[in-house]
Amino acid sequence: MPLKARRRRRDKLSWGGDREMELSAGDWTVAAVFYAVVVGVSLWKSARRPDSADYFLAGRALPWWLIGISIVAANISTEQFVGMAGQGAGAVGLAVSNWQLMGSVAVVLIAWTLLPKFLRAGIYTMPEYLEYRYNAATRSIMAALTVVVYVGVLLTAVLYSGALTLRAIFEIPLERGVWMVAAVAALYTSWGGLRAVAWADLFQGIALLLGGLVVFALGLRASGGWGQLAMAQGARLHMVLPAEHPGLPWTGVLAGIWIVELYYCGLNQFIVQRTLAARSLRDAQLGVIFAGALWLFVPLAIVVPGIIAWHLYGPDLARPDDAFPMLIRRLVPSGLRGFMLAAIAGAVISSLASMLNSAATIATMDLYQRWLDPRAPPRRLVAIGRVLTLAFVAVAALWAPRLDDPRWGGVFQFIQQCQGYIWPGVVAVFAAGFLMPHAPPAAGVVGLLGGPLIYGVFQRWAPNLHFLIQVAVAFQLDLLLMGMITLWRPLAEPRVLPERRSMESRTSSGVIAAGAAVLAAVGAFYLVFW
């Protein structure tokens, strides 16, 4: 589309320009009623006095459909609405969808392979599994690394991106927005634990997907339809980018993204915790596969709207991360603004609550109980979990406004690059645990400490090498180091892992069929947008 025509269309469609987005009394009522229902249902469902299994793992009774929606709500937040849409508007385009679509592949493979092992072990946390395979030190190191990353990177980024979106759309000051969303999430998370989080996610997960699809539909109409958009922005509608591309080269996707997805979907507490809380193996497997199916909507609900924002308002975007907020400011009509406010707030609150609950679970079960109070009764563990939840959200809320400095390079980039310090080591230690039966405890300790150090060397001395390739090489070197330790001092006998839960061990034909359908859909998407 010629620039003048684009400007005329932009002027025509801009109902509010760059002035404050006005919310009617009806809009505020919709948002208020939505959150009254969310908080009310979550507190009601978790009203009984919980023991540790109920507070941290929802009584191990979650059904598959609630697990799937809760995973989506935990995963998709404003760092996606801001960051992924921003990369869609920027140089990466549709290829940023590789993160979600490779996640859909990963959850299917994990459902078929790792989940049966984890559920039979009856564990509370992923670090706990490492104690059975290696030793207590390995468990504690992973627990400490996970808590630091959750609080210092993930919680901080979710709070910042949520407050940034509220500021961009509704002119709410950044620090006020940070504390607003932090307060709501901390309320029901500290009260009801995972059960409250999962039921709140049921409403928030549906709202955030619907909200994204609404913006997609409005943006597509404003662009003149898919044909017009594809004609003007065809260069951005490809999933595979050249090897020299600085944003997301195909070499980085091929070499390193599978390591990220294996960690994120199979070893990451705030995702896996929902499957550990499943009432059966079938519910756990179908739950993650259902989440993988819902992730197929992310390109339409989040990434393509970023491309549309560039198509319509490119010259007005001060930075790519402003893409999704600008679409909402300029395209969402009165009557839908209250719903969009609820959807945006729901995106950040659901992810924040999930991360808070998981960070508190790990800190309580893997650090406090393991080292400070091994005989703590369940009621005391719940109290410690509540205190840690409030402490973690306070630390993240104090740190979040600092991300407003443009030197961080965008919130999505900040999240992905900083998590590189944990990905290689954790995946290497779990991979060695499964593939090297005689790997000794020392290999686990060295693997967890070596991953961040090796990745840090690449960050310092090879900054121009794409971080996914850095992750891949760090993983390989770390695994090699663990292999050398195993050859030097192997275990005399492989460790026998616990099987504390009585449940079926075979994957049903229905689970296999559902996973195969998701894999086929991902393959079709790549064929269309190669």
Image (cartoon, rainbow, N blue to C red):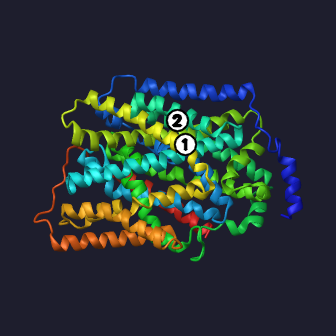
Residue closer to the observer: 36 or 282:
36
All told, the count of numbered labels is 2
Name the spot of residue 455 as percent of width and height, x first.
41, 66
Residue closer to the observer: 415 or 31:
415
Residue closer to the observer: 369 or 198:
369
Name the spot of residue 250 as percent of width and height, x first.
54, 73
Q: Give the number of the disc on residue 513.
A: none
Residue holding disc 2:
182
Q: Amino acid at mark 2?
A: Ala
**Quarter placement of the C terminus:** bottom right
Above or below — where is 168 with respect to 132? above
Label 2 crowd bin: few (<14), some (14–19), many (20+), radius 10 Å: many
**Quarter placement of the N terminus:** bottom right
Q: Is residue 66 visible?
A: no
SS under mark 1: helix
226 displayed left or right of 272: right
Q: Earlier in the sequence, mark 1 or mark 2?
A: 1
Which residue: 15% across, 69% down?
Answer: 490
Label 1 crowd bin: few (<14), some (14–19), many (20+), radius 10 Å: many
SS under mark 2: helix
Q: Is residue 107 visible?
A: yes
Name the spot of residue 135 as percent of width and height, x first.
20, 54
Q: Are marks 1 and 2 in contact (CB under 8 Å)?
A: yes
Residue holding disc 1:
159
Above or below — where is 485 with respect to 6? below
Which residue: 50% across, 36% down?
Answer: 202
Q: Amino acid at mark 1?
A: Leu
Which residue: 59% across, 46% down?
Answer: 161
Which residue: 63% across, 62% down?
Answer: 94
